[in-house]
Amino acid sequence: MYKDRIHRRWKDTQKSRSVHDPTNLRLDIYQDKALCWYLTRLWEIGVPLRYKNVAAAINEILAAAYRPDESSPLPTVGEHWPSRWFKNHPEFAVRREKSIKLERQRAMNVDQIREFFDKYKAAVNE
């Protein structure tokens, strides 16, 4: 470290990089909260979080806040942006989905489910 940098930190005129406010954020505070709210709702209804779905949601948020009179292109996030966002938000996690076994997949037939519940009602009524 240089002498001047140490002196500025000692005088509290310059914060270290680990404590100063981040710059160049893609989302503002309200957009970040909206994304957190959206992902929480998806989790509550059982929708798994995937990086490409999160990136699509972020791009929708950015597109909604975009002003069309500007000459700049529509803002989007990069390929690795969602994974970095998840590192800053440990309350959310992307997990791999397990494929269901063939027997369970066949059992998810509407007719078989109805038949099961008909048998169940008959057993309860007896």
Image (cartoon, rainbow, N blue to C red):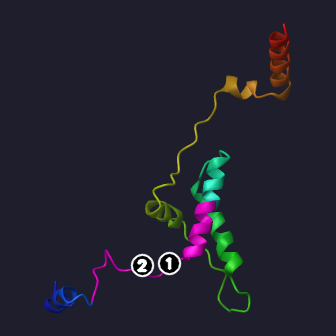
Residue hosting label 1: 25
118 with respect to 2 (left or right): right
Q: Are marks 1 and 2 in contact (CB under 8 Å)?
A: yes
What's the residue type where badge 2 is placed? Pro
Q: Residue at x 62, y 49 (%)?
A: 43
The numbered dot on residue 74 is none
75 to 39, vertically: above or below? below
44 to 23, vertically: above or below? above
Quadrant in which the N terminus is drawn: bottom left
- How packed mark 2 is, by other alpha carbons closer than 10 Å (few <14, some 14-19, many 20 or more), is few
On the image, the x and y values in percent for residue 82 come to: 53, 63
The magenta segment is 14-37
Q: Residue at x 57, y 57 (%)?
A: 51
Residue 25 sits inside the magenta stretch: yes
Choose top left, top right, bottom left or bottom right for residue 98.
Answer: top right
Choose top left, top right, bottom left or bottom right for residue 8.
Answer: bottom left
Q: Which residue occupies the extreme left position in the image?
A: 3
The numbered dot on residue 22 is 2
Residue 1 sits inside the magenta stretch: no
- How packed mark 1 is, by other alpha carbons closer than 10 Å (few <14, some 14-19, many 20 or more), is few
Query: Label 1, label 2: how many angstroms apart (C-alpha)?
Result: 7 Å
On the image, the x and y values in percent for residue 63 come to: 69, 76
Q: Overall secondary structure of the magenta stretch?
A: loop
* Near-viewer residue (122 or 57): 122
On the image, the x and y values in percent for residue 101 come to: 64, 27
Q: Residue at x 51, y 67 (%)?
A: 81
On the image, the x and y values in percent for residue 126 come to: 84, 7
84 to 65, vertically: above or below? above
Helix or strand or loop: what does disc 1 sit on? loop
Helix or strand or loop: what does disc 2 sit on? loop
Q: Residue at x 81, y 24 (%)?
A: 113
What's the residue type where badge 1 is placed? Leu
